[in-house]
Amino acid sequence: MKRAGMAIVMLSMAVAGLAGCSTGEDPAATVSTGAVSAAVAQPVVAVASNDGEDEPEVTYTRERKNITLPNRTVTRQTATLKKGVTKVAQRGRPGLRVKVFRLTLEDGVEVDRKLVSDSVRRKPVNKIVLKGTKEPQPTRQCDPNYGGCVPIAYDVDCAGGSGDGPAYVSGPVRVIGSDIYDLDRDGDGWGCD
């Protein structure tokens, strides 16, 4: 501030001196009355001395800071998948937060920082993983002598018939090998018909 005040005083004196020269008045009288002549067209440059101390150069700038917002992995159980099987149902994506700061620099050195903006530009999206819980069905054993599935047991009878099982089959079933359970009683190639 000393430099600016001193420069104004010197500028006023120089202008008053020039005004007095052009009108023939006393420069001191012109300064005291505050009148300035319109004849002065050239700018007057005044250099002020500040005892060797220079005022720091103050500049302002903005800084943008991107912050990654982490996403989570969510596991959900489902009976649509076999036990032990996993599947990604939704791919995740991290979010983005943006902060903008106003920096004050003196001679290129930061002396102040103020937050002027803080916003979430993109929300994080969770990754969703499906985990199967469906128990595998036991594989049914079928006798290769019959078309269709005739269970393998020490005795198989036609369902609804007079046999005592322990296994039963609903017919008709085609005999393609040996009729080991005697299901084709009439010998036409079809059992339980």
Image: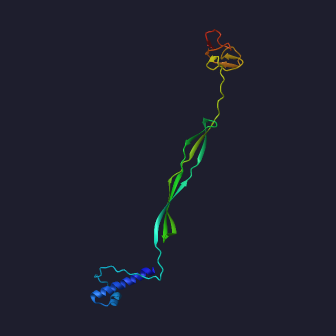
Colour convention: rainbow
In the image, residue 171 sits, relative to residue 139, either above or below, namely above
Identity of the residue furthest to the top in this view: 186
Q: Nearer the viewer, residue 103 or 32?
A: 103
Residue 163 image-quadrant placement? top right
Residue depicted at 42% across the width and 79% down the height:
4
Where residue 17 sits, quadrant-wise, is bottom left
Q: How many discs appear?
A: 0
In this rendered view, identify the residue nearer to me: 191 or 95. Answer: 95
Say which quadrant the C terminus sits in.
top right
- The answer to whether residue 85 is left or right of residue 164 is left
Judged left or right of residue 2, residue 185 is right
Image quarter in which the N terminus is found? bottom left
| Residue in the image at 44% along x and 80% along y | 3
- Say whether residue 118 is left or right of residue 76: left
Residue furthest to the front in view is: 52
Residue in the picture at 46% in, 68% down: 60
Q: Position of residue 133 (x, y in %)?
A: 63, 37
Image coordinates of residue 52 in percent, x first then y, are 47, 81
Percent across and percent down for residue 103 are: 49, 66
The location of residue 137, given as percent across then percent down, is: 65, 30
